[in-house]
Image (tube, coloured by chain):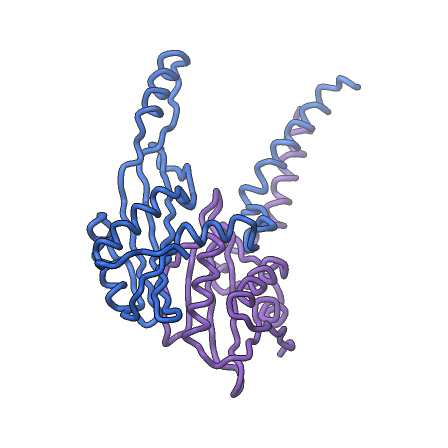
Amino acid sequence: MRLTRVAVIVLASATCCVCACRSSRAQLLAADESQVRLRSIQSRAFDTTDKSATLRSAMGTLQDLGFVIDDADETLGTISATKLKRYALRMTVSVRPRGQTQLLVRASAQYNLRAVEDPEPYQQFFDALRKAMFLDAHLIEEE
Amino acid sequence: MTHNPVLNTVSAHTLLLGMIVPVVTGCAGRIPRAALAMNPQTLEFRERSTRRFETTDESRILAASAALLQDLGFAIDDSETELGLIVASKERSAVEGGQVAAKIAYAVLFQADLPIDAQQKLRASVVTRPKGGEIAVRVTFQRIVWNDRGQVSKLELLDDPGMYQEFFDKLSKSVFLEAHKI
């Protein structure tokens, strides 16, 4: 029994060291994936310069996907929205000019307490947005 | 099958640790595969939550929507008229008779406290969009419910068709315009 307890304590301590040695404050500026790769997963370029129409299309797409919009700012080109479906999925979409003829749309999502870093959900979002805008979404080169 | 008590205790502890560690370290699971994908219900939901009004005056529709939300007891949290957006919320009781009855029955039968829904935050976003001489208005509702222990018990989209119909009936009266389905 004693051996068992020691084993459990050792295992628990090891787990703490592996998973939680960093202070939870370090989460403030933490980014789990490579920044460049993540930017590429989360961004698409569209052949339009109409920022307002793009933001409106993004809001429509988010509503299609069951989100309630939290706020939007045309000057900054940002939208935040939350989807509640036994989980909380919060999403921020930003739109900014890319060169003279394109807009860069970047989406970032947080699922419960975690940043979403899988390419697939973003691909799904951009597929939906592309249909709403009747425009192709171009993958961007890793910059 | 061995019946070594030490081994069994170790297995039980390992199992317990296996259950606790993901919670402690925040491994809250991955995003569901279809969370950001369109599905066959998307179009139906869009139709239910959207109406067209024959006007080009977007600010008039937005002002009427804000007034209606206020009539319904919502507080306006945010708005961006340039993009045709109003965000509103209200906090209300979430107590339901059936749950209270179940709580009492549970207490009598099992001498235990059954948590029941206590309060809720209802959120709404109204988005307007000019399209071909008309304004399309789309509203989406959701709520967060807390139980009487202060824990979140429900996170959900409110998609009851009756709610949307009633909202648009009221909006239609408020702007003196007929609301057309898309």
User: Percent x, y for residue B129?
Assistant: 37, 66
Q: Quadrant of residue A70?
A: bottom left
Q: Which chain is purple?
A: A
Based on the displayed image, in which of its 4 quarters is residue B112 positioned? top left
Q: Residue at (61%, 67%) from the top-left corner? A: A41
The answer to whether residue A87 is left or right of residue B128 is: right
Residue A137, located in which quarter of the rendered image? bottom right
Residue that appears at 27% across and 63% down: B62
Give the number of marks.
0
Task: State left or right for residue B16 relative to residue B123.
Answer: right
* Relative depth, front residue between B35 and B114: B35
Please tell me whether residue A141 is drawn above or below residue B63 in the rendered image: below
**Residue B37: x and y, percent?**
57, 55
Going by the picture, which residue comes out furthest to the bottom? A100
Q: Quadrant of the C terminus of chain A?
A: bottom right
For the residue pair B16 and A118, the one nearer the viewer reads as: A118
If the image is split into quadrants, where does the N terminus of chain A sit?
A: top right
Q: Residue at the top extreme?
A: B109
Report the chain shown in blue: B
Q: Position of residue B147 (x, y in %)?
A: 36, 34
On screen, residue B162 above or below A121: above
Determine the residue located farthest toward the right in the rendered image: B1
Q: Nearer the viewer, residue B13 or A133?
A: A133
In this view, the residue in front, B95 or B134, is B134
Measured as percent of width and height from the top left, residue B22 is found at 58, 42
Q: Give the side of residue B81 with respect to residue A100, left or right.
A: left
At x 40% / y 39%, what residue is drawn? B152
